[in-house]
Each structure stands twice: as C-alpha cells, then as structure tokens.
Image (cartoon, helix red, strand yellow):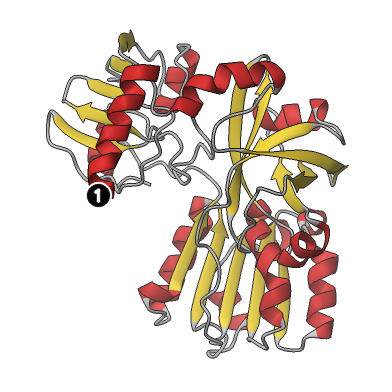
Amino acid sequence: MTTTLNPLKRFVNASLFNNTSAIDWLAPVIQLRRPGWQPGLFRCYVTRKQVINQHVLQLSLKPSARWPGFKPGQHIELNTLIDGRQQSRTFTISSPLSLWQKEGEVELTIRCHQDGKFTPHLLSAVSSGDRLYISEAKGNFYPETDRSPLLLVAGGTGITPFASFLEHQVKRDTPVTLLHFAPTSDDHLFSQHFTELSQQHPHFRYLPMSTQEQGYLSRDMLRQNLSENDSDHVMVCGPDGLMKQARKLALAAGIRAENFKTEAFSLALDNLESGAAQAAPAISVSQNGTSQQVQPDKPDTLLNQLESAGVAVRSGCRMGVCHQCSCIKSLALSSTCLQVKPLVQAKSAFKPASPKRKLQSNLVFRNQHEAINSGRFR
C-alpha cells in the first residue's frame, strides 16, 4: 500500500503545489517570520563562540528539543543566511556525547578559509545568541562495537570526529592509539584534553606529530611509534594525501580492507589527462523546468562553475562526501547535461560513463573528462 501511495502523494504535491511537498510550498511564508528556515532543518542558537587560533573557530550550539541527537563521529549541515541567500556547509560534531546528554549542546570546530564565503561569515558575523539551522546528524564514521586495538590517524581539523567519540571509546578499555598530524605543536587541537585522557587511561596513547619537524606519515614513523598489536582496525580522517598514504601502509601491514575506514576533509581530484583541463565544454543545466547553458572560463569544479554563473545549487561539504549537491547528469564527449534538483539528496557511486549515459551523482568534479577518466566518484 505504501508503495502505491508514495507516487500518488508525489503526483498530488507536484500538481497542487508545484513542489515535492506541501511544506516546501509553504516555506516562503514561514520564512517571512523565521528567516533562514528550511524544511527538514532544526532551529539552534549559538551559546558560545571561541576563536581558538587564526585558522580555527569553535561554535557551541543548542538545538531545539525536536533535534534527534547524534552518534559521536557524525556530521551535520549548518545553514545560515549570507547576503540574503541561504548557504550551508557540512561540519563534524567535535563534542562528546556527554555534553549533549547533560547540557543539550553540541560543538563544531571549524577551520576558517580566508578565500571562502561561509566560514569567514561565521568568524565575522555570527555571535552568541544568533539563530542558525542544522540538519539531522548523518554518517557512520565511528568505531565498531568490538574491543580490537584501534589506530586513529588525523590530519589538521580531521581530528574532530575522534574528539567526539574518544571519551566514550577509552572508557571501554579498548586499546587506542591516536596519531595527529599538524604543521606545528600550536596546531594540535584538543591536545590538552587528549593528554589528560592518556594519563587517566593507560591503554590510550596520544602521539601528536608536527609535520614541520617530524615529517609526514611514513613506514619508518609507524615502526618507531607502534607495535604490531596496535592496529587491528584503522580509522583515518584528514586530507586526501594522508588517507591514501595511510591506506597504502595499512594494507601493506596486513590490515583487512573492511577494517580500514576513512572520512575526507579535503577534495580529492584525480589527475586529468594532458590537455583535458583546457577542453572545458559548455554545461547545459535543467532546473525546475527551465534550462540554461554555462560556459566555464577556467578549470574548476562544476559546483563552483554553476554558482559563478548564478545557478542556485544546494551544497554542503563541497568535497563529494555529504551528497547534498547530487543531481542527474547525462555525459557526452562534447558536452555535459545536468538536471539539478537541489532539494533531492541521492547517494550513489560514480562509474565510468559511456557517451550520453545518464547517471546520478554530485557536482564535485572538474568536467566530464575527469569524471570519465577517474573511474569512480568520491
């Protein structure tokens, strides 16, 4: 019965409201009273704003009672109005579950990009008491339930999911080793907290690595700091280069692929074939029944190209992880056709495309040449 009603419900909503649901049709009216409100989001208030250093900001948020909570290691979509336009980005919750259970608050630890638009706005314009909107928590980047030795490898602000679940993990007497790579000792976020945890729990080892002095992740570094029994399971969060190196070393050491988990904190771009970046074709965009063409003037992600052309596209992490910018695309050798549906979220792997084949994926690739040559879609 449900299978029959769902298509009927979509048909009625599309016919009566020209939208996917009645609440989407009512959204502009609700936004007159609550600017920034969006269907499926939850109101929250900023209770504290702390600038940790010149690159990192921490926000404490108190969500409404309707927000269902989170599992440590999950991320949320943060929404706000910037210059009258709804903007969103995806951030991992960095606070432990105990803070949510006791105070009803969560914390986001955010790296601010000077050339960006969203994070500089948080730094300069958002204050305590301001109202923002968040999504439900998503993701499955948290440890398995067994007590096997666990190796955590973080790069920069990729430490945030580990900060969220480590407090609970070490109480289970699970052997845990944390390697955190950052340029200098001043860039090691939560270092005091991790040091205290390691003093309280002998089975937890905290190893901050300053790349300017000690270099990057290598086989020799692991041999010097780890024993053979320290890493039955490996979790890595950080830049793409760190994740690739960690995977290579882990598999070479005999770690099973299913025991290796990653969470991306940067955009991974595969190398283009020579000359492919210069042959940027026009992009045909179909959205809400209207179509337009976008001609890229430089190699860039499709998401940035569409936004530069004034096309309103929903996005979150901007790295191909959260799938907020998913769309329907048809690939041909001379053009790329996109049916952009900003309010529809879809998660699917990207596979090599033959000419004029329709696929569902997101917009974080440079052009159709890279999409076809990459062999997969992150």
**In the displayed structure image, the side of residue 305 where residue 230 appears, left or right:** right
Crowd tier of the residue under label 1, counting other residues whose Cα lies within 10 Å: few below 14, some 14–19, many 20 or above: few
Image coordinates for residue 167, horizontal then vertical, percent: 73, 73
Q: Nearer the viewer, residue 182 or 145?
A: 145
Residue drawn 60% across and 26% down?
A: 87
Does 226 appear above or below 212?
Answer: below
Residue drawn 73% across and 29% down?
A: 120
Does 74 appear above or below 135?
Answer: below
Q: Nearer the viewer, residue 182 or 198?
A: 198
Q: Is residue 18 visible?
A: no
Does 286 appear above or below 360?
Answer: above
**In the displayed structure image, the side of residue 128 where residue 255 appears, left or right:** left
Q: Dividing the picture into quarters, in which one does residue 206 lie?
A: bottom right
Q: Is residue 296 visible?
A: yes
Residue drawn 57% across and 17% down?
A: 28
Residue drawn 43% across and 20% down?
A: 305
Q: Name the outermost residue toward the front.
A: 1
Q: Hey, what amino acid is under mark 1?
A: Met
Image coordinates for residue 177, horizontal then vertical, percent: 65, 78
Does 372 appear above or below 155?
Answer: above
**In the displayed structure image, the side of residue 200 where residue 64 appears, left or right:** left
Image coordinates for residue 106, horizontal then vertical, percent: 74, 53
The residue where tag 1 is placed is 1
Q: Nearer the viewer, residue 82 or 12?
A: 12
Image coordinates for residue 174, horizontal then vertical, percent: 63, 86
**In the displayed structure image, the side of residue 349 where residue 165 appears, left or right:** right
What element does badge 1 sit on?
Answer: loop
